[in-house]
Amino acid sequence: MTDFGSMLFVFVLATFIGLGVIRRVSRLLYTPLMSLTNAISAIAVVGSIVVAGADHPLAIRILGAVALFASMTNIVSGFMITDRMLKMFKKQ
Amino acid sequence: MHLIGELSAVLATALFIFALYWMNDPKTARRGVIAGIVGMTVAVVATWIQPEIIHHGWIIGAIVLGFAVGVPLSRVPLTAVPQRTALSHAFGGLAAGLVGMAEFFLWKGGSSSVAMTPFRMSALGAEVILGFLTFTGSLMAAGKLQEVKWIPQRPVTYPGQNFVNIGVLLVAVGLGVAVVLNPGAPWAGQAFIAIAALALIFGVLLIIPIGGADMPTVISILNAYAGLSAVAMGFVLDSKLLVTAGALDGSSGLILSIIMCRAMNRSFTNVLFGAFGKAQPALAAGEQKEWKQETVEGAAQLLEQARTVVIIPGYGMAVAQAQLKVRELYDALTKRGVTVKFAIHPVAGRMPGHMNVLLAEANIPYSALVEMDEINPEMPQTDVALVLGANDVVNPAARYNKSTPIYGMPIIDADKAKTVLAVKRSKKPGFAGIDNELYVGDNTWMLFGDAKAVLSDLVKQFGSGGIH
């Protein structure tokens, strides 16, 4: 299918952007970086919303709701703890 | 409606890239969090307002529960951040695995909106395998970090372990290939469940042979897996946003894994096959040298008379909750005109960058935190190296002793300082079970005791006017 190619294309380009951007991240901030990327990759939440919220059989929606809960936990705790840690980095 | 979805996906992608870009400097980093939150909100709202979403109660309920669990998880003590990170990799993997299962059975039941091409079916298999192995693997890692009783801390190994592990993975992948080739077969549903089960088992098997000292590397690898499972989900759902965000996460995990591998002197393949962490205590060397013990008064005098002091912190400092005392010592010394720096080994602490966060919490300015590569050339001119809870990362044996498991690991050259003061809780060897030659070096003086207690005593020496 045509989207096969375009999706791989997006993946390769995004990986290069990711490698380029992450390489520049301050070495002081690797721990907050990891919690930030955790939160960002919880964008899987959009997949879970569709599975949990559309008119699917009950069992499917339960799977979706659990996935949505898991993603939402990552989003909330990921962004909050990243900010909490970043607040601590003060320059004298 | 479709237009809104596409545009919001582009906006969210751009915001996510900016979020990571702003992490290049602590001054701009908090902006990154805001960019991330805005991007995430845009993506969630754009998905939620689609007309096919009708069960709003389910979504609200799951989101509320997510907040209920997520907020307390973001308030854990900073020593527990590695566990929290591992747990969030587990949640990320679980979400990917469950959505993958749901998509498969939706398609099987004939109610899926996406056409199941062989490419998508392969991506679905990859999503479920990566998602579920990340789930159980990260749970195991979190359990080891939390020191949960029924999960062994020490590496568990048995003969043929790699065979078993790779065998389980190969069976799962083989079943995946069979499903891709015969998606309509009557056994495809059962095969798919078997794939999920094997992936869950593989995650556990992957982590049990790994010891605590390797956790920074393991967390980074699981991070990469969690990202890749999101990418696979993006392939299945035909979502470029998911593919991009997953790829950003995956490349971050990849880079951190490589940095951690280098810092431990392990090859990447070695790590991928889980054949590491088998730390065997080295045989005792021929002659046993004696410790030389120093008093707190003597140590205070040494520090006071120094022009440059390099503090080398390890996780032991955090376990003893000594960060605030470290800050007091830092203040006392800088007030007297002593230059104080902190030497940070890349694997100091239990996850990448952990030590920097622990010291930042104690209000130590980040300009005083220096990476190993930058501090090592300065060590010969350093008057006093103060080793605080660090052990293997300052062991000179890593340079030449091929029989130790840490051979070849880059270390902080504490032994090259004019004087070494080492604070140590007891006379037992460190985490990797190796004797540390630094402690019996000619220019080394030991201060035995709990790091917090020793540091308070040191600070008191400066405060009480005992030294002028």
Image (cartoon, helix red, strand yellow):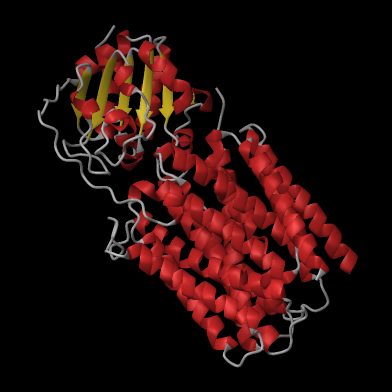
Q: Can you tell which quarter of the image residue B391 is in?
A: top left
**Residue B126 seen:** yes
Q: Residue at x 32, y 20 (%)?
A: B385
Question: Which one is nearer the viewer's eye here, B389 or B267?
Answer: B267
Q: Residue at x 55, y 58 (%)?
A: B225
Question: Which one is nearer the viewer's eye here, B462 or B12?
Answer: B12
x and y percent of residue B423 in the render?
25, 29
In this picture, is B92 found above or below B434? below
| Image quarter (top left, top right, bottom left or bottom right) of the N terminus of chain B | bottom right
Q: Can you tell which quarter of the image residue B308 is in?
A: top left
Q: Can you tell which quarter of the image residue B301 is in?
A: top left
Q: Residue at x 21, y 44 (%)?
A: B281
**Residue B34 seen:** no
Name the side, left or right, on which B375 lies relative to A36. Answer: left
Name the side, left or right, on which B403 lies relative to A28. Answer: left
Question: Which one is nearer the viewer's eye here, B126 or A60?
Answer: B126
| Image quarter (top left, top right, bottom left or bottom right) of the C terminus of chain B | top left
x and y percent of residue B197 in the render?
47, 77
Name the side, left or right, on which B280 lies relative to B61. Answer: left
Q: Residue furthest bottom?
A: B186
x and y percent of residue B94 in the render?
54, 69
Q: How many marks?
A: 0
Name the side, left or right, on which B62 lies relative to B314. Answer: right
Q: Residue furthest top?
A: B468
Question: Which one is nearer the viewer's eye here, B116 or B464?
Answer: B116
x and y percent of residue B300 in the render?
26, 16
In this picture, is B211 found above or below B266? below
